[in-house]
Image (tube, rainbow, N blue to C red):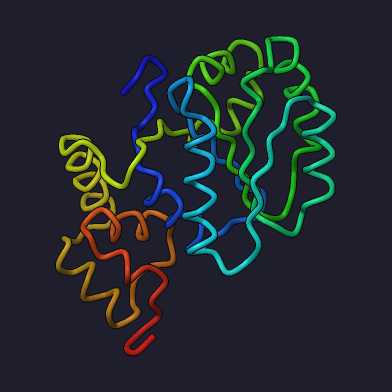
Amino acid sequence: MNELGLAPIAIWPLAARLASTPTMNEWVVLATASGTVDAAAAEMTAQLQSLFEGPVERRRITSLSELMKVIGEHGDRMLVLHGLDEFGPRDLRQVDMYRSRLIREQPTVLVLAEPVVALFPEHAPNFWSWVRASTFRAILEDTLPEEDREQRLAAMREHFGFNDEELVRRALDGSLPDEPDIAEWLVLIGRGELVGRRGPGT
């Protein structure tokens, strides 16, 4: 965990969660180290494109007007947005003011440097309250540190009330609940090929 208490997550499991059960007006914030934002956005886009049946578009956003334009013109596709690291406190206050205009049909991923995300609680508190539960610290590459991975797996096993073997059995017979955490769980135990499976032979 960092000073914001963000849970770490590898990009591939997060992409699997988003692609498996896309939710209307779902916003995810992916915080990453300064200097790795473009790489994280590119990796997230590539993973989503390999998993999601609909269109996925990556856009670099450098102004509030550009953000609003992209949101308004691309409601039919999943968006991965980066470039907002150039936003300062005044820009974030405007984002907070116009947050109702950010509502859209498909999920949106904001990839931001961690220092920018740290400004949200003070300068965009309403937007932060909206996205706080879906804000993560990105781990580039496909694996989490073993300690973080085990903590995440333990949390999911407790939440759903069954173990990894039962998870795989239910994935194979198509009886898993349709929840984003399930896709992440399968990826974390190395069974990502079962994501989205709806029963034998599918």
Q: Nearer the viewer, residue 40 or 13?
A: 40
Quarter of the figure with the C terminus: bottom left
Question: What is the count of numbered marks?
Answer: 0
Q: Position of residue 84 (x, y in %)?
A: 66, 25
**Depicted 89 relative to depicted 60: above or below:** above
Q: Residue at x 34, y 34 (%)?
A: 8
Q: Position of residue 32 (x, y in %)?
A: 45, 27
**Depicted 179 relative to depicted 119: above or below:** below
Q: Residue at x 30, y 57 (%)?
A: 187
**Depicted 199 relative to depicted 15: above or below:** below
Q: Position of residue 190 (x, y in %)?
A: 22, 60
Residue 127 relative to residue 190: left or right? right
Residue 97 relative to residue 89: left or right? right
Q: Nearer the viewer, residue 173 or 160?
A: 173
Q: Nearer the viewer, residue 56 or 9?
A: 56
Quarter of the figure with the N terminus: top left
Q: Residue at x 67, y 55 (%)?
A: 106
Q: Name the outermost residue toward the bottom.
A: 201
Q: Position of residue 82 (x, y in %)?
A: 62, 33
Question: Residue 6 falls in which quadrant of the image?
Answer: top left
